Image: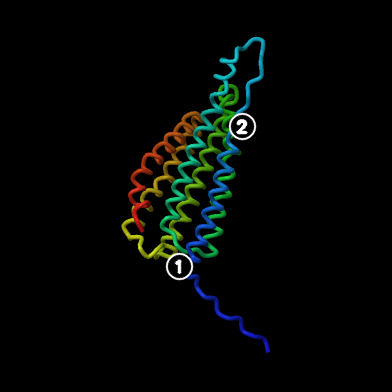
Amino acid sequence: MQETPPPSTPLDPADAEKETGRIEAFSDGVFAIAITLLVLDLKVPRPQPDHSLLQRLLEEWPALMAYLTSFVTILVMWVNHHRMFRCIRRTDDPFLFLNGFLLLLVTFVPFPTSIVALYLRQSEARPADARTAGLVYAGTYVVIAIAFNVLWRYAARRRRLIGARVSDERIREISRLYAPGIPIYLVACGLALYSAWASVGLCLLLAVFFASTGRISARAANAPL
């Protein structure tokens, strides 16, 4: 006679917190790798007889702009991810896969960053390709914003994975702070159809905007639990 497996028992609070801590530590490592890979696209200018070093450095500024935009954006995502985990006290399998999907997208960011850095330099000679590069770049952030919102709302829906001491007001405030990312990055995608420079510039402004609103979310997400 086949034995019936014993029913699974829920983790006690200490074990549950250890599990979320492991997820956050793994995620931190992925964020760190992604943000480090961005610098690989910056190249030391080779000496040329008809160009000074200063001229060659100025020619690299599209790559520097793309690097700065992606660095600040990933940094802001990491900060918000950390604050999210201050509210999350439990985990389950769907949440693990949703978090993994978000990390998949984060590690993808260096690729469109390299594309847009290359084709911004050629925006006058190849304007259509530059616009495509801007669309791919902004579109990546649209998908990331969707993944970020889905991850948070899955955890927050009916307080599924939220700590008992986290207030409903705190959950609503964090949800409001995350919501604008999708429509605004869609605007950046629309801009890319006309100007890659304008699209990347808006992405940079969005990164700065979300960094500044992080001070507001800090009151919600860093309050004592």
Return the mark for residue 129.
none
Q: Quadrant of the C terminus?
A: bottom left
Looking at this view, name the residue that lies furthest to the top: 50
Q: Give me the residue at 44% from left, 59% from top.
A: 88
Q: Earlier in the sequence, mark 2 or mark 1?
A: 1
Q: Position of residue 162 (x, y in %)?
A: 41, 62
Q: Looking at the picture, does residue 122 appear above or below residue 13?
A: above
Within 10 Å of disc 2 (Cα), the crowding (few <14, some 14-19, many 20+) is some
Which residue is the site of mark 1? 13
Which residue is the site of mark 2? 41
Q: Quadrant of the N terminus?
A: bottom right
Residue in the foreground of this view, choosing between 30 and 134: 30
Q: Label 2 is placed on what type of residue? A: Asp
Within 10 Å of disc 1 (Cα), the crowding (few <14, some 14-19, many 20+) is few
Q: Give me the residue at 45% from left, 67% from top.
A: 13
Q: Looking at the picture, does residue 219 appear above or below residue 188?
A: below
Residue in the foreground of this view, choosing between 155 and 146: 155
Looking at this view, name the residue that lies furthest to the front: 14
Q: Position of residue 36 (x, y in %)?
A: 58, 38
